[in-house]
């Protein structure tokens, strides 16, 4: 086997292995702090306008993501989510019954501590993510005097790795068959 044929074989093997590599997912972080109400992860979070109370509910929109993805997890960073405090998070589903707010769950955390709460988003929100998912917090849903500060809102999307199309596989197969035929002809 000549050096050029060894190099050609190595290139073909590399292309085949790269083309058929394991299809693993890649997380894509989308961090958005679109309003002045998201506070810093410092002691300033305890000051206005970052710490808000029951009468100060608000909403925000994540940045739009138009690429392909297979799953979505929303993580919200908060400060001072006390035991017994209920701070509900909602996402707007534009296609559900003409558009409605859907409760994702409530924030979790501890007194005077920073924490993150994650919510797995169902596929009905995927079209909303493509246009910019709208979110809302119902601060202190029981109006018990609790306050909370949000530090960030992160949308983690899992994108699929490229999977070869049937036409790409056919072209690769024809190329390999041609190489085999050329090699046999040279040997004959």
Image: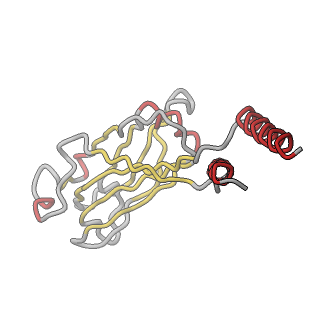
- Residue 116 place in picture, x, y as percent: 35, 63
Q: Which of 130 and 181 is in front in this view?
A: 181
In the image, what residue occupies the spot 17% across and 43% down? 36
- Residue 67 at x, y percent in the picture: 50, 36
Q: Would you identify the image quadrant in which residue 111 lies?
A: bottom left
At 74% from the left and 32% from the top, the residue drawn is 167
Which quadrant of the figure contains the N terminus? bottom right
Percent position (x, y) of residue 113? 24, 71
Q: In which quarter of the image is residue 3?
A: bottom right
**x and y percent of residue 12 in the render?**
67, 48
Foreground of the two, 185 or 157: 185
State left or right for residue 132 relative to residue 188.
Answer: left
Q: Which of 20 and 182 is in front in this view?
A: 182
Residue at 22% of width from left, 46% of height from top?
56
For this orientation, the residue located farthest to the right is 188
How many circles with numbers are drawn on the protein? 0
Q: In which quarter of the image is residue 62?
A: top left
**Compared with residue 122, is residue 81 higher up or lower down, i.e. above or below?**
below
């Amino acid at each position: 086997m000549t050096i050029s044929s060894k190099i050609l074989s190595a290139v073909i093997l590399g292309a085949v292995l790269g083309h058929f590599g394991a299809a693993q997912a890649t997380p894509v972080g989308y961090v958005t702090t679109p309003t002045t109400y998201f506070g810093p992860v410092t002691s300033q979070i305890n000051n206005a306008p970052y710490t808000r109370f029951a009468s100060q509910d608000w909403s925000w929109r994540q940045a739009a993501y138009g690429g392909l993805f297979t799953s979505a997890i929303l993580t919200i960073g908060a400060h001072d989510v006390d035991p017994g405090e209920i701070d509900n998070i909602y996402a707007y589903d534009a296609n559900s019954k003409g558009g409605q707010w859907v409760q994702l769950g409530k924030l979790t955390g501890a007194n005077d501590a920073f924490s993150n709460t994650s919510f797995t988003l169902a596929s009905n929100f995927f079209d909303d993510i493509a246009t910019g998912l709208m979110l809302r917090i119902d601060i202190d849903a029981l109006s018990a005097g609790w306050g909370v500060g949000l530090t960030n809102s992160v949308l983690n999307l899992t994108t699929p790795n490229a999977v070869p199309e049937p036409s790409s596989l056919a072209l690769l197969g024809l190329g390999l068959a041609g190489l085999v035929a050329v090699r046999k002809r040279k040997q004959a």
